C-alpha cells in the first residue's frame, strides 16, 4: 500500500522561523506526520530574516530557473532547500529577490503592511505548485498554514484542477488567530484575472484583507483546522456557516494523532464543487 503524501505549505516553521507564530506547531506536526509513515514535502517562503549560512540553505539548480507571470510581469523563481537533520526532514524555500530579500516579513520598519503582500502570496502559491510539478510528486493532501497560503485552495480548485499532479488532492486549511485587522492595499482581483479567476470565484476578497483571505481559503478547502483555542468571531461564524469538516483545536500533546485521524477522514470525503 502506498504511503499517503502530505504537502505542507506554511508561512513559518521552526527552526528557520523560531519564535514566530505557529512555527513550532508546524514543525511538530510535519515531523510527526512523517514519523507516522506518511510521505511529506514542506514549503515556505525564503524570507530575508532567515539566516541562510546558519541553516545551510542552498539553491536547487534543477528546480530553479522558471519565470512566473504575476500581474502580467515576469518574476524569476529560485528554489532553495535546507535540512533539519534531527528530524530527517527537508524544507523547500520559494525565493525571489523582489519579494523576499527584504529583512522583514509582512511589515516595514514603520509597522505598515507591505503594499505588495498579495503579490508575494500569489508568487508563493504559484511557486509551490510549479515546483511540486517539477518534482513529479502528487500529494494526496495539501495542508496550508497561515493567511499567506490563502490563495492555494482557490488555485488548486480552479487553475490547477485538471492538472494530474493535483486533481485528486484534498485541501486542508488551518486558520490561526493572527493579523486579522490588516488590510491589503493592492487590487487583488486584477491580479487574479490574469489567471482567469473571476470576481465571483474570489468574491471573498473583493474587499481585500487578511480576514477575507482566510475566508477565501476556507471556501475552497475540504477540511478546516482550528489552529488556536479562540478565533476571530467573524471567522468562527464563517467556518460554522460553511458546514465544512472541522478539526477542533489540539495542543502539542494531541496534535499529531488528531491530525492523522483527520487526514484519513478528509481523504474519504467527496471533493465539494465550489460555484
Image (cartoon, rainbow, N blue to C red):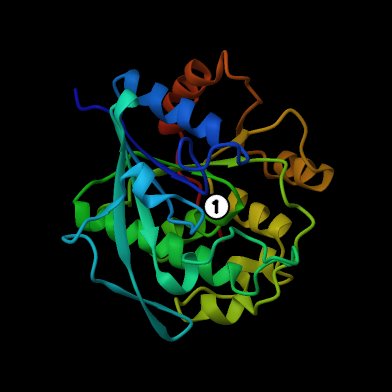
Q: Toward the viewer: 133 or 186?
A: 186
Q: Toward the viewer: 152 or 75?
A: 75
User: Is residue 82 visible in this depiction of the protein?
Assistant: yes
- Left or right? Give the position of 229 relative to 140: right
Q: What residue do we see at 32% from left, 51% from top?
A: 166
* Disc 1: CA contacts within 10 A as few (<14), some (14-19) or many (>=20): many
Q: Is residue 212 above or below residue 142?
A: below
**Among all residues in the image, which is located at the extreme top?**
253
Q: What residue do we see at 46% from left, 77% from top?
A: 196
- Left or right? Give the position of 25 relative to 178: left
Q: Is residue 51 above or below residue 184?
A: above
**Among all residues in the image, which is located at the extreme front?**
53
User: Percent x, y for residue 157?
Assistant: 45, 57
Count of numbered labels shown in the rendering: 1
Location of the C terminus (image quadrant) = bottom right
- Left or right? Give the position of 17 relative to 4: right
Please identify the quarter of the rendering in which residue 74 is found.
bottom left
Q: What residue do we see at 61% from left, 75% from top?
A: 188
Q: What residue do we see at 48% from left, 59% from top?
A: 48
**Please, what secondary structure does the residue beneath circle 1 have?**
loop
User: Is residue 163 visible in this depiction of the protein?
Assistant: no
User: Percent x, y for residue 209?
Assistant: 72, 63
Q: Toward the viewer: 43 or 261?
A: 43
User: Percent x, y for residue 227?
Assistant: 64, 33
- Left or right? Give the position of 206 relative to 219: right
Q: Is residue 233 above or below residue 229?
A: below
**Among all residues in the image, which is located at the extreme bottom?**
72
Name the residue carrying label 1: 220
Location of the N terminus (image quadrant) = top left
Q: Toward the viewer: 152 or 54?
A: 54
User: Percent x, y for residue 96?
Assistant: 40, 68
Amino acid at each position: 500500500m502506498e504511503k499517503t503524501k502530505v504537502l505542507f505549505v506554511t508561512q513559518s516553521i521552526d527552526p528557520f522561523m523560531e519564535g514566530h507564530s505557529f512555527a513550532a506547531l508546524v514543525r511538530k506536526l510535519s515531523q510527526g506526520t512523517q514519523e507516522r509513515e506518511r510521505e511529506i514535502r514542506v514549503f515556505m517562503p525564503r524570507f530575508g530574516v532567515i539566516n541562510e549560512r546558519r541553516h545551510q540553505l542552498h539553491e536547487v539548480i534543477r528546480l530553479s530557473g522558471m519565470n512566473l507571470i504575476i500581474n502580467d510581469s515576469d518574476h524569476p523563481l529560485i528554489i532553495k532547500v535546507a535540512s533539519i537533520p534531527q528530524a530527517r526532514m527537508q524544507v523547500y524555500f520559494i525565493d525571489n529577490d523582489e519579494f523576499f530579500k527584504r529583512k522583514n516579513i509582512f511589515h516595514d520598519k514603520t509597522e505598515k503592511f507591505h503594499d505588495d503582500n498579495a503579490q508575494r502570496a500569489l508568487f508563493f502559491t504559484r511557486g509551490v505548485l510549479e515546483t511540486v510539478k517539477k518534482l513529479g510528486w502528487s500529494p494526496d493532501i495539501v495542508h496550508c498554514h497561515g493567511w499567506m497560503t490563502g490563495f492555494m485552495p482557490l488555485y488548486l480548485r480552479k487553475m490547477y484542477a485538471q492538472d494530474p499532479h493535483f486533481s485528486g488532492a484534498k485541501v486542508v486549511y488551518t486558520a490561526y488567530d493572527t493579523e486579522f485587522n490588516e488590510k491589503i492595499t493592492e487590487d487583488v482581483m486584477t491580479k487574479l484575472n490574469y489567471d482567469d479567476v473571476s470576481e465571483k470565484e474570489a468574491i471573498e476578497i473583493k474587499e481585500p484583507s487578511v480576514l477575507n483571505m482566510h475566508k477565501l481559503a476556507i471556501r475552497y478547502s475540504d477540511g478546516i483546522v482550528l489552529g488556536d483555542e479562540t478565533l476571530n468571531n467573524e471567522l468562527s461564524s464563517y467556518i460554522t456557516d460553511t458546514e465544512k469538516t472541522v478539526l477542533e483545536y489540539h495542543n502539542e500533546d494531541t496534535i499529531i494523532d488528531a491530525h492523522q485521524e483527520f487526514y484519513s477522514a478528509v481523504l474519504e470525503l467527496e471533493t465539494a464543487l465550489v460555484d
